[in-house]
Amino acid sequence: MIKIKVTSHLCKWADHQQQFLSILQYHSHQLPLGPMPVDKPPKYPPRVNYAPKTRQFYWCQYPKDAHLPEFWKIRPVIVISRKNKLHGAVTIVPCTSQDQTGNRWAFPLEYSIDGQPGWAICDKISTVAVSRLTPNKGGIRRQSPEEFNEMIKIVLGWLPKAW
């Protein structure tokens, strides 16, 4: 009896999923939907020896198959998540050396990027695997608490407010 219930629920779920995909394909002319991936993506070992800490700068290898305007190359980031694990994921704020004057969601950094003034792009926070992070050649730098707090104010200003 229980098996019949579970099977009927799975059949209904599969029918709903197929209907949803059909509707999505019909309305999505620009992004063709292919078959659903069957295999999980590979898991890579971390390139760092310790779990990243809040306020640390790293270089992040973003996916190469990104869709613009997503980030897609190796770029500096600041870790903003707490209680990170070596084999887990971290929440980061990407940085750039391109001038962001006039961008209200960009925060000027004291830290320079390859000798150029750096900016944190506070409206592009994302979560990535720790295995995407690489320490800087000169070691892992850490943002000052004062600078971090000012940057987080901008990040929080970009997020939606509670109702």
Image (tube, rainbow, N blue to C red):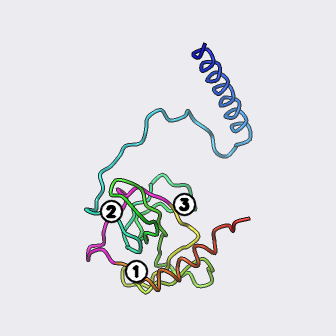
* Left or right for 89, reference 5: left
Real-space Cα separation, disc 2 to disc 3, in angstroms: 25 Å
**Looking at the image, is mark 2 or mark 1 earlier in the sequence?**
2
**Looking at the image, is mark 3 or mark 1 earlier in the sequence?**
3
Please provide the residue range marked out in magenta. 127-141
Residue to which mark 2 is pinned: 51
Question: Residue 116 bears which disc, if any?
Answer: none
74 versus 88 height, above or below: below
* Marks 2,1: beta carbons within 8 A: no
80 versus 64 height, above or below: below
* Marks 3,1: beta carbons within 8 A: no
Real-space Cα separation, disc 3 to disc 1, in angstroms: 25 Å
Q: Residue flagged by tag 2: what amino acid is it?
A: Ala
- Residue at screen point 54% across, 60% down: 70
For the residue labelled by badge 2, is the local secondary structure a helix, a strand or a loop? loop
* Percent coordinates x, y for residue 16 in the rendering: 69, 29
Residue to which mark 1 is pinned: 143
Residue 58 position by quadrant = bottom left
Residue 118 position by quadrant = bottom left
* Left or right for 80, reference 158: left
- Residue at screen point 65% across, 27% down: 13
**Looking at the image, is mark 2 or mark 3 earlier in the sequence?**
2
68 versus 107 height, above or below: above
Q: Residue flagged by tag 3: what amino acid is it?
A: Glu
Look at the image and say whether residue 89 sits in the magenta stretch.
no
Q: Residue flagged by tag 1: what amino acid is it?
A: Gln
Position of the N terminus, as image quadrant, is: top right
Residue to which mark 3 is pinned: 70
Please tell me how crowded label 2 is: few (under 14), some (14-19), or many (20+) other residues with Cα within 10 Å.
Answer: some
Real-space Cα separation, disc 2 to disc 1, in angstroms: 16 Å
Position of the C terminus, as image quadrant, is: bottom right
